[in-house]
Amino acid sequence: MPVKKVSKSMLSAPKEQEQVVESSPVEVSSTAEHTKTPAKQATSTSDALELFKLIDSEDPAPNEDDTLSNTERVERLGKVVKKLNLLMATLNRSFKDYERKVISKEKRLVRVEERKANNKKKGGSGGLKKLQRVYNEDFKSFVEAHYQSLYAKPDKKSSKGGSDDEGSEPKLILSELTYEDGHLMINREDSLSLVSSYVRQNGLQYEDNKRRIVMDDTLKTLFPTLAEHTAPNGDVVEEDCYFHTLMRGITRHMKTADELAEFDSQQEERRLAKSGKQPTQSATSTPANTPSATPQKAKKGGKKAKA
């Protein structure tokens, strides 16, 4: 039989095929590792590099890992750690900002609640709507004589309602009176409404200034401190009767004799302070054993001299 000559290329072909066959499983396995999610914890240098590739989101050149030295691999891992540290720092800052906003909102809510609580106490102990005793007989007689004929001022919003509000009867400020131990019980808000209604129904307002009240004999009896009168120091106090000053006169009727003396003393001090005059001993009812302002100034001056 004739013998065929075998060339070197024919002998080297199977080796190349073997190399192709051997290299293909490696490539398949490497592509499979890229598609695995989530990534496993790094247990070797190659796994750590795979994690770096996923974080860096860059496609490395083929067989680039084989050409990297250990130093380059460590540097790449260091970059990954820096990126993670920056991410953690950003998250910490955002968390602190969010926490600060939550704390500020909580403080704001606390302040709002405190304001609401203070508003309920506005107008003295108990507020304007708390029932209080009337100690003045003139004001008690005024309420008993007029409460069935004094009506509340119509609401501006309800007056614009149209047909529903047309023909509606006016509402009484007080439908009945309450007593306790012989004293009339009424709150200051209703008291102010009664007096204001009395002024409007009787036309006791100045034409040039509707806020100023013309004081008839009834109002002069009820509010002597708002009418023209002589102060304890001899000054003639002019009439000061307005809608916004009525509450000052109403408050006097709901105080005992001792409380009324202290209240009038405080009002006189305020009047003298506005006029720029010094309060007298009789006007302010200062106790005899209370040190005056002059010795206190002398003491302060003595301390400065010693210094």
Image (cartoon, helix red, strand yellow):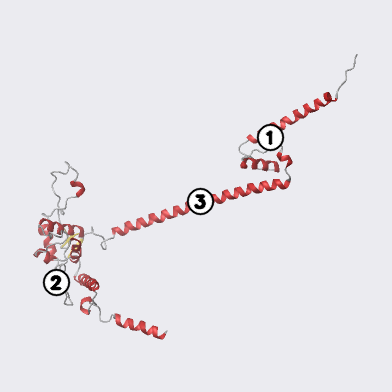
The x, y position of residue 56, in whole percent, is 62, 42
Q: Secondary structure beneath disc 2? A: strand
Please state which amino acid type lies under the numbered disc 3: Phe
Marks 3 & 2, CB-CB < 8 Å contact: no
Rate crowding at label 2 as few (under 14), some (14 to 19) or many (20 or more) other CA atoms within 10 Å.
Answer: some
- Between 248 and 2, the one lying in front of the other is 2
Horizontally, is 142 left or right of 278 in the view? left
Mark-to-mark CA distance, 3 and 2: 68 Å
**Between marks 3 and 1, how big is the CA–CA gap?**
39 Å
Ranked by sequence position, the earlier of labels 1 and 2 is: 1
Question: Is 104 drawn above or below residue 228 in the view shown?
Answer: above
Q: Is residue 141 above or below residue 37?
A: below
The dot on residue 95 is 3
Kindly report the distance in space between the C-alpha atoms of the residues bearing marks 1 and 2: 106 Å
Quadrant, the N terminus: top right
Q: Residue at x 39, y 83 (%)?
A: 304
Helix, strand or loop at mark 3: helix
Three-letter amino acid code at the position of disc 1 = Ser
Q: Circle 1 — which element?
A: helix
Going by the numbered disc 2, the residue's amino acid type is: His
Q: Which residue is mark 2?
A: 229
- Can you tell which mark lies on residue 30? 1
Q: Quadrant of residue 128?
A: bottom left
Residue drawn at x 33%, y 84% is 298
Image quarter of the C terminus: bottom left
Spot occupied by residue 238 in the image (x, y as percentages of width and height): 15, 70
Q: Residue at x 86, y 23 (%)?
A: 7
In the rendered image, residue 247, in percent from the top left (x then y), is placed at 20, 63
